Amino acid sequence: MMPDNTGNRAAHAQGTAAHLAQLLPRLAGESPEDMNPIGISEHQQILLDPEHAWLLYVAALRSLPHCFAIADGFPVDPSCKMPDGICHRCAAEGRCLPPDHPLR
């Protein structure tokens, strides 16, 4: 989650961009030199290429509980107890909410 202190926004943006720059090539199976760099705008917003955004989207759909998946082709388990907990199917697949998610 984004820190409340806006004074640290620039440092947070730079740190997050650095982590994404290491993570995204690994998700794509490419070398960091083959991917476009991640930028930061003058308003301290991280600028992603469409390929970067798509990689993050696919990674989220593969790791979040099924009931968070809204794209066609990702079934929702009607017996899932979210947001009260992770259903057995999601737990068996290693799916979970991030530790700091408010529903966890």
Image (cartoon, rainbow, N blue to C red):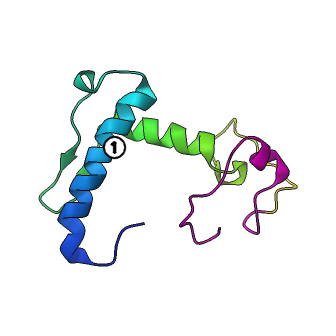
Give x and y (percent) for residue 32: 27, 27
Amino acid identity at mark 1 = Leu
Q: Residue at left 54%, top 45%?
A: 60
Give x and y (percent) for residue 19: 32, 46
Main secondary structure along the magenta-highlighted residues: loop
Q: Residue at left 27%, top 48%?
A: 17
Residue 101 location, quadrant: bottom right
Q: Is 57 drawn above or below residue 31 in the view shown?
A: below
Asked if residue 49 lies left or right of residue 87, the reply is: left
Point out the stretch of residues depicted in magenta. Answer: 82-104
Q: Quadrant of the C terminus?
A: bottom right
Disc 1 secondary structure class: helix
Q: Residue at left 34%, top 72%?
A: 3
Asked if residue 38 lies left or right of residue 99, the reply is: left
Is residue 85 on the magenta stretch? Answer: yes
Q: Quadrant of the N terminus?
A: bottom left
Give x and y (percent) for residue 79: 88, 55
Q: Is 7 drawn above or below residue 73 in the view shown?
A: below
Residue situated furthest bottom in the rendering: 5
Residue situated furthest right in the rendering: 79
Query: Which of the two residues, 100 or 38, is positioned nearer the viewer here?
Result: 100
Residue annotated with mark 1: 20
Q: How many marks?
A: 1
What is the crowding at mark 1: few (fewer than 14 residues within 10 Å), some, or many (at least 20)?
some
Q: Residue at left 39%, top 41%?
A: 53
Is residue 101 on the magenta stretch? Answer: yes
Give x and y (percent) for residue 75: 76, 42
Query: Which of the two residues, 25 or 45, is positioned nearer the viewer here?
Result: 25
